[in-house]
Amino acid sequence: MNEPEFDLFIAKVARELKEPVELDAQFDARVMASLAPAVISLDSRRAPTPWYRRQLSVPAPIAGLAAAAAFAGIAAIGMLAREPQGSTLAAGSAETLVRVNDSPDREAVVTAPVQFVFVAPSTSRVELIGAFNDWQPTPMAFDAAAQAWRVTLSLPVGVHEYQFLINGTQHVVDPTAPQTASDFGSPNSIVKVTPVP
């Protein structure tokens, strides 16, 4: 086929392609029906989402939020009730601030003073043990005017578990503070330390 014949052939094909094509009204439906069994959805070809990329939704029921707010309120009331009203230290006794668990990087640890009071006038010795002093006894001083044992510690901000140790043998929780179960199942008192404004 020479070049003029080829040009005529191309012009004829182009003319045919420009003509409108009439298709049956059911043509699309027949084509799609024939393809349907072989079509694979895009979702089935995707790899499953890895566990670290999955979105999780955690329901927060109103009752749970109310219980958390009630617990926070009880803890706040317990902190306020810890200090007996109108009590003063006995004459000649000085209340000292005891620092526990000194951190090598003191500037990075925010602490606040916390006073612990335990009313037990008939006991001969009361000590404070807790997570903040590695459960090693910290002696408490007896306040004769208030008939209570006291110690003030400088504790890091956060929540701490503790107990009172009576006469070196008996473990007692603080009746004025909220309680939690320890890792061993026994009850511990808890104190929440907040930064001093």
Image (cartoon, helix red, strand yellow):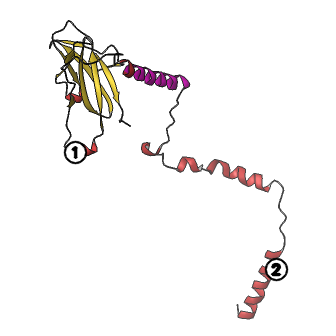
Q: In this view, does 22 lie above or below 94?
A: below
**Pointer 1 local density, CA inside 10 Å: few below 14, some 14–19, many at least 20:** few
Amino acid carrying label 1: it is Asp
> Mark 1 or 2 closer to N-term?
2
Count of numbered circles in the view: 2
Residue 146 pos. (x, y %): 27, 13
134 shown above or below 186: below
Camera-side mark, 1 or 2: 1
> Looking at the picture, how far across and down is residue 37, in whole percent?
64, 47
Q: Check disc 1 and report its element: helix, strand or loop.
A: loop
Which quadrant does the N terminus fall into? bottom right
Name the amino acid, label 2: Arg
**Going 43% across and 42% down the picture, which residue do you hit?**
51
Q: How crowded is mark 2: few (under 14 residues within 10 Å), some or many (20 or more)?
A: few
Q: Which of 150 and 132 is in front in this view?
A: 150
Mark linked to residue 15 = 2
Q: Residue 128 is drawn in which quadrant?
A: top left
Residue 5's place in the image compared with 123, above or below, is below
**Can residue 64 be seen in this snapshot?**
yes
Q: Specify the farthest residue to the top.
A: 122
Q: Residue at x 39, y 21 (%)?
A: 80
Residue indicated by mark 1: 105
Relative depth, front residue between 65 and 52: 65
Provide residue 185's location: percent of width, then percent of height. 29, 17
Q: Hey, which quadrant is residue 182 in on the image?
A: top left
The region drawn magenta spans: 62-78
Q: In this view, does 138 lie above or below 1?
A: above
Screen quadrant of the C terminus: top left
Per the image, label 2 sits on a secondary structure element best described as helix
Mark linked to residue 180: none
Q: Give the prevailing secondary structure in the magenta stretch.
A: helix
Task: Name the residue furthest front.
Answer: 91
